[in-house]
Each structure stands twice: as C-alpha cells, then as structure tokens.
Amino acid sequence: MRCYLISDNVDTQMGMRIAGVEGVVVHKHDEVMDALKQAVSQDDIAAVFVTKKLVELCRAEIAELKLTLRKPLIVEIPDRHGDSHISETLSRYVSDAVGIKM
C-alpha cells in the first residue's frame, strides 16, 4: 500500500516526495476532482493527502467521498504556507461522520 498527494504547491510536493510520497500539483476544482478520481481508482493507494487550500476548494465533494468510500483514506494536510488547526479539522470530520456535535 502507498500514499498519494494532491497539492496546490510544488514545495509541499517536493517535501512529500523526499518522504517517498508521489503526487500532483493542481490548482483548479476540475483538476482536483480528476486527480482524486484517478487516486481512488487505484487499488494500491491506501491514503490520499490533500492540502487544505484544495480541500476548501472542493469541500462538499471531498466530504462525500470521505463518507462513502471505504478506501482510500482522504486526509487534509496543511501546507507550508498555511496555519494548522488540525484538531478542529479532526473534530469536524468526526462530527460529520458520526452525526454528533462535539
């Protein structure tokens, strides 16, 4: 199993590539959705990392994929330019998945 990155900047892509994670750099809604469709169709991808800016660009579609797909796990990650409110993101994800406000 492997991981895959969908990023909005080359710096994040290069950092993840050093760690052995391949990926693409995209900027538009359609590009993000095409990259996601390609990633989820590959059986050997266990996790797809998507930068926060791109998740905000496609929030509804990504939320739907997170709730309906068994695999791969889609994870929102901060890029080097953004701030990290990962606990809020995780709380929101759990609330959406379970249907309970935290």
Image (cartoon, rainbow, N blue to C red):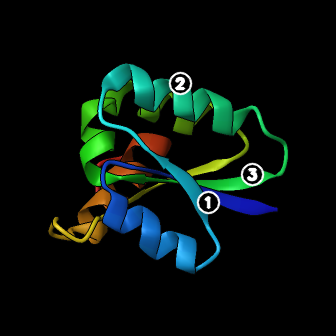
Front-most of residues 24 and 68 = 24
Question: Is 26 on the left-hand or right-hand side of 40?
Answer: left
Residue contact at pointers 3 and 1, CB within 8 angstroms: no
Choose the circle earlier in sequence order: 1 or 2: 1
How far from the left and from the top, in percent, is residue 35?
Answer: 54, 33
* Residue located beneath label 1 in the image: 22
Quadrant of residue 37 within the rendered picture: top right
- Quadrant into which the N terminus falls: bottom right
How far from the left and from the top, in percent, is residue 65?
Answer: 55, 31
Secondary structure, mark 3, is: strand
All told, the count of numbered labels is 3
Q: Spatial distance from mark 3 to mark 2, Cα to Cα?
A: 15 Å
Q: Amino acid at mark 3?
A: Ile
* Residue located beneath label 2 in the image: 34
Residue contact at pointers 1 and 2, CB within 8 angstroms: no
Is residue 21 placed above or below 39 in the rendered structure? below
The disc at residue 75 is none
Q: Spatial distance from mark 1 to mark 2, Cα to Cα?
A: 16 Å
Q: Residues within 10 Å of mark 1 (few under 14, many from 20)?
A: some
Residue drawn at the location 30% of the way across and 58% of the way down: 89
Is residue 74 placed above or below 67 in the rendered structure? below
Tell me if I can see residue 51 in this picture. Answer: yes
Q: Amino acid at mark 2?
A: Asp
Q: Residue furthest bottom?
A: 19
Question: Is 8 on the left-hand or right-hand side of 72?
Answer: left
Question: Is 25 on the left-hand or right-hand side of 35?
Answer: left
Choose the circle earlier in sequence order: 3 or 1: 1
Q: Residue furthest top?
A: 30
* Residue located beneath label 3 in the image: 45
